[in-house]
Image: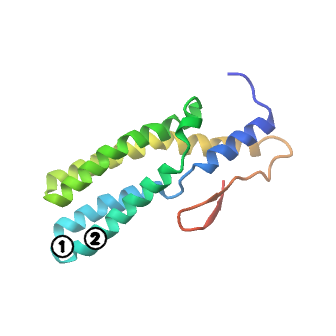
Amino acid sequence: MVEQSVEQLKARAELMGKYYFRGFGNFIQIVVANAQIYLLYPEDRVEVKKETLDAYSLIEELYKKIPFEELKDNEDFKPIFSARDLLPEYKQALDSFFEAPTEEKENILDKLGIKILETVEPYRENFWGLTKKIRSISENENFYVKVIDWNGVEWRF
């Protein structure tokens, strides 16, 4: 790979930060945990289903904002493409679970959730690693990428 200048590295980190979804794993875990609750506590099903579908909808909305066509040739974003491609299958499993909840369907959701998280994890690792690499370069110790999460909270990476 051709060495990149500090400015190129910074631009790359800023672009990656623009599409970094802080809390993505939490939303996948909400779906999985709520499926378990849905099975165990029928009296809470209306509220749990709404919370679960809201969490999933937030994931979908955030993914709709990513300009995949512009990023298709950028290797940094391959994990996000892969996770995006798994979301329809995850939604189908979620809908199937809510239509007729069973432990088997809950296990399918769990396995798909883990698969999505494992698929997108390299993006997080690469993004965090890149920001650390930039800060390790002389006179760049104070470089951070600001990321605004789904709740409007600012994070620095």
Q: In which quarter of the image is the N terminus?
A: top right
Using the image, determine if residue 33 lies above or below residue 72.
below
**Residue lying farthest to the top in this orientation:** 1
Q: In the image, residue 110 lies at what x, y percent? A: 28, 51
User: Disc 1 on helix, strand or loop?
Assistant: loop
Q: In the image, residue 128 lies at what x, y percent? A: 62, 46
Q: In the image, residue 65 lies at what x, y percent? A: 53, 51
Using the image, determine if residue 83 lies above or below residue 20.
above
| Quarter where residue 156 is shown | bottom right
Give, as a three-letter code, the residue at label 2. Answer: Val
Q: How far apart are marks 1 and 2 (CA)?
A: 9 Å
Query: Which residue position holds label 1?
Result: 41
Q: In the image, residue 141 lies at what x, y percent? A: 80, 50
Using the image, determine if residue 9 lies above or below residue 97.
above
Query: Label 2 crowding class (10 Å Cα cut-off): few <14, some 14-19, many 20+?
Result: many
* Depth check, front residue: 40 or 78: 78
Using the image, determine if residue 24 lies above or below residue 54.
above
**Residue lying farthest to the bottom in this orientation:** 43
| Mark carried by residue 17 | none
* Depth check, front residue: 100 or 119: 100
State left or right for residue 39 relative to residue 20: left
Tell me which residue sits at (54%, 36%) in the image.
69
Tell me which residue sits at (76%, 29%) in the image.
4
Are circles 1 and 2 on residues that touch, CB within 8 Å?
yes
| Mark carried by residue 48 | 2
| Quarter where residue 101 is shown | bottom left
Q: Please tell me which of labels 1 and 2 falls first in the chain.
A: 1
| Quarter where residue 127 is shown | top right
Give, as a three-letter code, the residue at label 1. Answer: Tyr
* Depth check, front residue: 103 or 15: 15
Tell me which residue sits at (63%, 42%) in the image.
129
